[in-house]
Image (tube, rainbow, N blue to C red):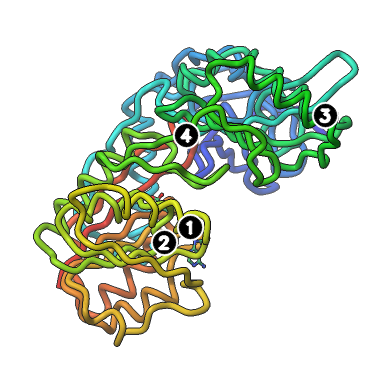
Amino acid sequence: MSTLTVTINRLGAHGHGIANTAEGPVYVPHALPGETVAIARNGSHGTLLSTATSSPDRVVPLCRHFNPDRDACGGCSLQHLAEQPYTDFKRNLVVEALRSKGLTPPVEPLVTCGLGQRRRTVFSARRTDKGLLLGFNRAETNHIVSVEECPVAAPAIMAQLDALRSIAAALAGGSESFRLTVLETLAGLDVAAEGVKPLDEKRRRAAIETVMRLSAIARVSVNGEILVEPRKPLVDFGGVLVTPPPGAFMQATKEAEDAMAALVLAHVGKAKRVLDLFAGSGTFALRLARTARVHAVEGEDKLLKALDLAARTTEGLKPVTVEKRDLFRRPLTAQELKVYDAVVFDPPRAGAEAQVRELARAGVKKVAAVSCNPLTLARDLRLLVDQGYEIRSVIPVDQFLWSPHVEAVALLQR
Ligand SMILES: C[S@@+](CC[C@H](N)C(=O)[O-])C[C@H]1O[C@@H](n2cnc3c(N)ncnc32)[C@H](O)[C@@H]1O
């Protein structure tokens, strides 16, 4: 570990300032381009000690837990950056990823994200000598930073910190840490604990009693099994109500989900047969079913069951069929894809390479790609463009405020 003064040259893809030094780049969280800063250097990592010259783009962070100190929450990395350079940074992540694959389509302005919109939040919890610790992890560590506020998470979640602490305390078996995924739903909070030591009957009963005293909690599940469900959690996918399985994937903000769904629906337009790949519990499929027959394909059984139940119990939808399938190992073939007028795909961070290779050969007229990783999106779009697709537009969406993550929707046609 050595102390030195460096000048920050640029902002890296993870939102850290990067200083080019004779010994190679040093990544300095909380530092901005143009700033001269004193750092404690440990290999390629620099801990910010003080700022000698401050960037005009620096703003005062909103949250007390965002700071370069030892007890800093790792949830945000860009709270100290002013709005315009921040939106430029996010949009550029998409522009640069596309450019790296030789793609220069029209990229729209960033769809921005407001405070308090994150409806799905993952807390870490652990029993300690001083009581129950609930918070977020410090960046790239298992150290839990106890939080009292979070301007990013939904107020409905942050208002229940005491309730969440009491649930975590009732579930904690030993001193090992575990996760609480909390989803704001129309019926109350859906709390999914993972990594909890199996509950014996006494702890189980005590945990149920704790939850039953808490009016804001709709459901608590432990390691994937429902422990207690005072009310069925419900989320609204464009007027279709769905009960997601415990801890299920859900777009992190409802606003981003609505914006992305509106883009997808407008692009698909009057298509009569639509395929939704990596469909989850129906975010896009159930909205699309208002006007089109939809086939939804997804790898997780529980998600598909939730989608299927909602499709069968909601009036006014066109037929929806579901298929459990591993789309990495067994993508739909070009032959199978040919019958669709439009295809929507929304894969995990790894992207959809195998599936897109088939799609590129199938000749489907309209394609909408939704992605949380600009790099794999760019790779997949390149495959489509090489087979004659035109990228009409790419819309970056800020779903993860102040993090270095960005969503994007790409609309293609041939
Ligand atoms: C980014 S999420 C999108 C889900 C859904 N479109 C939504 O908006 O909620 C990606 C989805 O892909 C599914 N998935 C991951 N790997 C898969 C695979 N190999 N085959 C099929 N589905 C997979 C996940 O279960 C998850 O539901």
Report x, y in % for residue 45.
Answer: 70, 39
| Residue closer to the observer: 124 or 89 | 124
Within 8 Å: ligand 1 and the Cβ of disc 4?
no
Q: Which secondary structure, mark 4?
A: loop
Question: Can residue 254 be seen here?
Answer: yes
Q: Distance between the residues labelled 4 and 2?
A: 22 Å
Amino acid carrying label 3: it is Arg
Vertical comparison of 7 with 155: above or below: below
Measuring 50% from the left and 15% from the top, which residue is drawn there?
61
| Residue closer to the observer: 142 or 246 | 246
Measuring 44% from the left and 38% from the top, which residue is drawn there?
252
Mark 4 highlights which residue? 233
Mark 3 highlights which residue? 203
Question: Can residue 69 be seen here?
Answer: no
Mark 2 highlights which residue? 278
Within 8 Å: ligand 1 and the Cβ of disc 2?
yes
Which numbered disc, 2 or 1, marks the residue that appears first in the sequence?
Answer: 2
